[in-house]
Image (tube, rainbow, N blue to C red):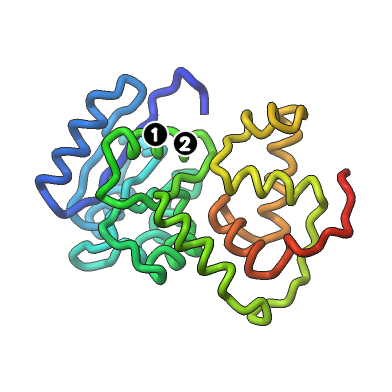
Amino acid sequence: MNANKVIKVMLVEDHPKYRKVIEMAISAEPSMEMVSVFGAAEIALRNLRDREGQPVPDVILLDLNLPGVSGLDAIPKFLDELPATKIIVLTQSNAQTDIEIAVQRGASGYLLKASTVKQIVNGIETVANGGASLDGDVALHLLKMVQARSKKSEPAGVVLSAREREILLLLSQGMLKKEIARELDISFGSVATYIRRLYEKLDVQNAPAAIDKAHRIGVFENTGEQNE
């Protein structure tokens, strides 16, 4: 995302007091704009379908425990309407099943409501710029899940080059494309190409899902490939 571009944010949260806290936090950020706020996923989705002339959000902050359609069920619906929009789950739940399902369904971030305002703002910036934002405890849960899961559940038919695995590892550390380019001393365009190929090979849409699937199918164990 252009560094000078204002990040447009949609909030889907049914708790009025917490909604106000997030609205105030976004309003205080000159690089962000809260373009819409909803208390239920159905209303937000209906608004998106009928949005003629309304701004399209770059990032959606989505609670899980919502009246009607849950946040987990809403994730693919939002991505169907807005494929380029990033979704950050913002919830009280650190349940492993919720984390796993959210990532698998396309969430680019998972933050707990115990996060500070600064952590939430930083998470929005990270995700808007192509990174992944995970609460520290959530990241640990995710790592434990993929390490514990049997690799027999899916054939290891995906082979990544050493360079692709290297970039995937840096993505798992929360690095953005430009930071990866500096770290590996290659061009930004090369990093973008590698990441696009990674997502195609793994058949995923974002970094958290790529990291999850790579561990699940054991691609990090394949050390025979050489750097391209």
Instruction: Name the secondary structure under disc 1.
Output: helix
| CA separation in Å, label 1 and label 2 | 6 Å
Q: Taking 182 as reference, is 216 above or below it?
A: below
Q: Which residue has dot 1 on it?
A: 122
Q: Residues within 10 Å of mark 1 (few under 14, many from 20)?
A: few
Residue at 64% across, 43% down:
170
User: CB under 8 Å between callouts 1 and 2?
Assistant: yes
Residue 73 visible in the displayed image: no
Locate residue 177: give its quadrant. Answer: top right
Q: Amino acid at mark 2?
A: Thr
Of residues 45 and 108, the one nearer the viewer is 108
Q: Position of residue 225 (x, y in %)?
A: 88, 55
**In which quadrant will I find the C terminus?**
top right
Q: In the rendered structure, find residue 190 and report the number of the disc placed on it.
A: none
Residue at 62% across, 79% down:
150
Residue that extends furthest to the left in the rendered view of this protein: 17
Residue at 80% across, 62% down:
159
Residue at 76% across, 64% down:
221
Q: Taking 167 as reference, is 203 above or below it?
A: below
Q: Amino acid at mark 1?
A: Asn
Q: Position of residue 100 (x, y in %)?
A: 46, 66
Q: Which residue has dot 2 on it?
A: 126
